[in-house]
Image: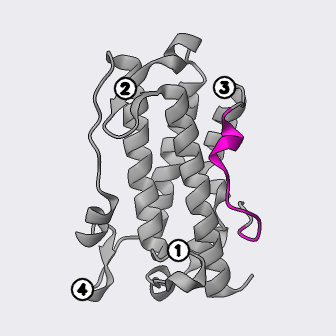
Amino acid sequence: MIDHTRPKPELASLNNLPHSELVLRFKTGVENFDPRVLSLTDAQLDTAFRPDAGVGRWPCRVLLGHLADAEMVWNHRARRAVGEDRPVYSLWDENAFIDAHVYGAPETGAKHPAGAFVAVVHSQRLWMAGWLQTLTEPQWQRSGMHPERGATSVRRMIELTTWHLEHHAWYVNAKCAKLVGA
């Protein structure tokens, strides 16, 4: 579990890891989450925080839903880069997903289960880690075109998605500590 009392994870910490170590860190996935997140009440899952709380504003349910979507996006991009010649990726607007209540609309009673989001992340990480372990060096270097980042290798995508989950896990854990105690 990522300790929210320590500094947030740094992307640079992944840059020089051998592929095998990067895959192990990638595979860790949901083990980075405070397990108490699965015991939060609906009210706790939907609690938004003020900016001065220092734990991010998104409620835990939104954050976990965002991570589930991000896993699918990153994994599809990496697989396309290996399978296609320099695919072009589309952007996705994470805030539009929130505004459209993709993760639930507590004010109307729609509450998507947080455990389902965690299960998606867990399943995707296990599935992808097995696949990543089979990649050759040339496959790790294959790339796709990101509209903002430009050419992005499979290696870089896995660094980014590993950091992305660790970064957001820091916030999930900090929110849990605020909601149920350290």
**Helix or strand or loop: what does disc 3 sit on?**
helix
User: Which segment did they paint magenta?
Assistant: 4-15
- Prevailing secondary structure of the magenta residues: loop
Q: Label 3 is placed on what type of residue?
A: His
Q: Gap between marks 3 and 4, in whole Å?
A: 45 Å
Q: Label 2 is placed on what type of residue?
A: Gly
Q: Gap between marks 1 and 4, in whole Å?
A: 24 Å
Can residue 128 be seen here? The reply is no
Residue occupied by mark 2: 144
Q: Do the residues labelled 3 and 2 touch (CB within 8 Å)?
A: no
The mark that comes first in sequence, 2 or 4, is 4
Q: Which residue occupies 49% across, 65% down?
A: 115
Residue occupied by mark 3: 19
Residue occupied by mark 4: 108
Q: Gap between marks 2 and 1, in whole Å?
A: 31 Å
The mark that comes first in sequence, 3 or 2, is 3
Mark 1 vs mark 4: in front: 1
> Which image quarter: residue 5?
bottom right
Q: Gap between marks 1 and 3, in whole Å?
A: 31 Å
Q: Which residue occupies 48% across, 43% down?
A: 124
Q: Label 1 is placed on what type of residue?
A: Gly
